Image (tube, rainbow, N blue to C red):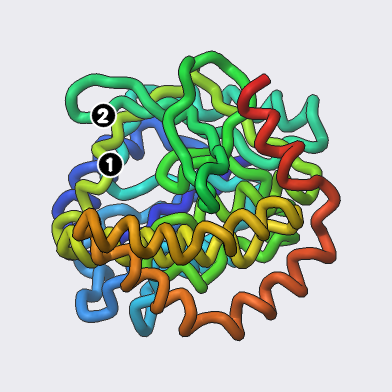
């Protein structure tokens, strides 16, 4: 029923350590590892794991396209996205399958995640402020609507994932691609749920922070935040707000010496042609307006 997709980049030792641990709970699942670090062939290192499927990218594709490659060969009805730095403690991730069977609009279920200090996170909301789409942790951890299914620990209906085109490579190498995918699902009439009964251990950014500077991470994050708006927002009121606040936002971040925002803006501008292509394609499936979606996270 479940195909587990594990994207990996450079962190071979952690991947192998966690794989040995997690396979105990992945019995009966198809396990697909996609190596996004072409300079390092993992055939020898993973030889002991006879049951896994290994895909090795010929070039670095980033998180989104790496997961898409795994989804493209997955044989089962549901795909579970599992970062290589995520640790399972049981097989409760299989329980939510019944929710998909009861709700034909269900796109994904996002898991609760225990961070390094023991704090539980995973339920999030989106909100609009000063011309930008922003996100924050939800006020509770109850079962219910979630703004997005986190790309490191979630269960997704594979057919819906493929119908939406999977993750968008425009966000490569990382950040906002999982928010984007779930938002497109919301706008297409599907639902994303947070299930606190499935808990995994996940130390966020532990992999990305090893290989990218904080300034690079911030620049990519701001770039992708802007791309998300240009790609997906269709409500005229919100679009006008974005344009109205754009220059003041640039000035505001410059005064704060947060130069990553302006760098991210200009990097987003370089992808404007791709943005227009995506908007044209996405609007064909969008049936829910932005205001209605955002209200769901505050009901």
What is the x, y in percent for residue 247? 45, 66
Query: Where's residue 257, x and y in %?
Result: 19, 59
Q: Residue 181: which numbered mark, if any?
A: none
Taking the spot 15% from the left edge, 63% from the top edge, the residue there is 213
Q: Quadrant of the C terminus?
A: top right
Based on the displayed image, in which of its 4 quarters is residue 276 positioned? bottom right
- Number of numbered discs present? 2
Q: Give the mark nearer the N terminus: 1 vs 2.
A: 2
Q: Residues within 10 Å of mark 1 (few under 14, many from 20)?
A: some
Q: Quadrant of the N terminus?
A: top right
Expressed as whole percent of the image width and height from the top left, the position of residue 79 reads: 57, 47
Q: Is residue 297 at least partly visible in the picture? A: yes
The residue carrying mark 1 is 204
Residue 226 as seen in the image, left or right of residue 119: right
Q: Residue at x 21, y 80 (%)?
A: 39
- Quarter of the rendering containing residue 73: bottom right
**Residue 91 figure quarter:** top left
């Amino acid at each position: 029923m479940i195909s587990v997709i594990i994207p990996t980049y450079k962190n071979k030792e952690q991947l192998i350590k966690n794989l040995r641990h997690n396979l105990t709970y992945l019995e009966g699942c198809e396990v697909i590892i996609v190596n996004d670090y072409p300079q390092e062939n993992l055939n020898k290192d993973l030889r002991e794991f006879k049951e896994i499927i290994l895909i090795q990218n010929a070039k670095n594709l980033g998180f989104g396209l790496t997961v898409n490659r795994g989804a493209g060969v997955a044989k089962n009805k549901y795909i579970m996205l599992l970062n290589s730095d995520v640790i399972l403690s049981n097989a409760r991730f299989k329980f939510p399958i019944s929710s998909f069977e009861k709700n034909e609009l269900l796109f994904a279920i996002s898991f609760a995640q225990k961070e390094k200090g023991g704090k539980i996170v995973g339920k999030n909301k989106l909100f609009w402020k000063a011309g930008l789409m922003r996100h924050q942790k939800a006020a509770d951890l109850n079962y219910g609507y979630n703004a997005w299914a986190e790309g490191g620990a979630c269960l997704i209906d594979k057919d819906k994932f493929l119908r939406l085109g999977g993750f968008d490579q425009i966000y490569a190498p990382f950040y906002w691609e999982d928010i984007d995918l779930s938002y497109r699902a919301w706008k297409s009439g599907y639902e994303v749920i947070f299930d606190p009964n499935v808990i995994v251990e996940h130390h966020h950014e532990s992999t990305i922070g090893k290989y990218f500077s904080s300034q690079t991470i911030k620049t990519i994050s701001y770039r992708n935040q802007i791309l998300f708006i240009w790609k997906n927002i269709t409500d005229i009121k919100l679009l006008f707000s974005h344009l109205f606040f754009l220059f003041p936002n640039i000035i505001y971040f410059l005064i704060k010496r947060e130069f990553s925002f302006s760098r991210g803006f200009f990097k987003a501008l370089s992808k404007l042609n791709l943005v227009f292509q995506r908007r044209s394609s996405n609007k064909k499936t969008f049936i829910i307006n932005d205001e209605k979606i955002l209200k769901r996270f505050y009901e």
